Structure formats: structure tokens, C-alpha cells
Image: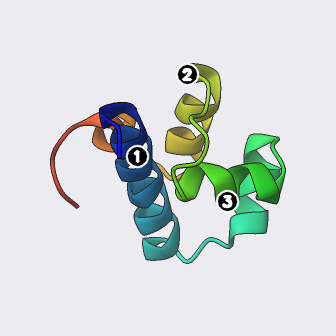
Amino acid sequence: MSGESEKYRKIGAKIKFYRQLKNIGQTDLAGQVGITSQYLSKIECGKQMPSLQVLLLIADKLEIDAAALISDSVV
């Protein structure tokens, strides 16, 4: 797995972790952010990297600092 795709996977896993921690469904979060649930699924699986704008919106809706999603720290 390339370094970039590993980073995408880690970011997606963190989004999923925080989303589930707050008991927010994938469809609900996607709707709040203005993206499809399919796109959010691809982000969470590390198959797609969100734009900075989408990443910031996701962090805002999850009520976390965006840095928590992109840092190398483990959740």
C-alpha cells in the first residue's frame, strides 16, 4: 500500500471512529455535510480523499478539531 493511500485510510478510519462515537449515521453525516453517503463511505474506507472544505465540514459536524483527523496520532 502506498504512503498516500495509507494516509487516506487513516483519515477515513478516524472519521468513522468519531462518527460512530457520536452515534451519527453515515447518511446523516453525509447529509449534514452536503455529500452523498456513497462518497462518505469511500472516504471512510480510504478509497477517496476529501477536499479540504469537505474535511473541515466533517470535523465541524463531528465537533472535533480537523487536526485530529489528519494528525498521526492513533485514536
- Judged left or right of residue 14, residue 24 is right
Q: Gap in Å between the C-alphas at discs 1 and 2? A: 12 Å
State the residue at coordinates (67%, 59%): 41
Residue neighbourhood size for the residue with mark 3, other residues' Cα within 10 Å, grouped as few (<14), some (14–19), many (≥20)? some
Q: Are marks 1 and 2 in contact (CB under 8 Å)?
A: no
The residue where tag 2 is placed is 52
Amino acid type, residue under disc 2 in the picture: Leu
Q: Nearer the viewer, residue 64 or 27?
A: 27
Amino acid type, residue under disc 1 in the picture: Ile
Residue 68 in sight here: yes
The x and y percentages for residue 23 are 55, 77
The residue where tag 3 is placed is 41
Judged from this view, the residue extending furthest toward the front is 1
The x and y percentages for residue 19 are 52, 65
Residue 11's tag is: 1
Secondary element type, mark 1: helix
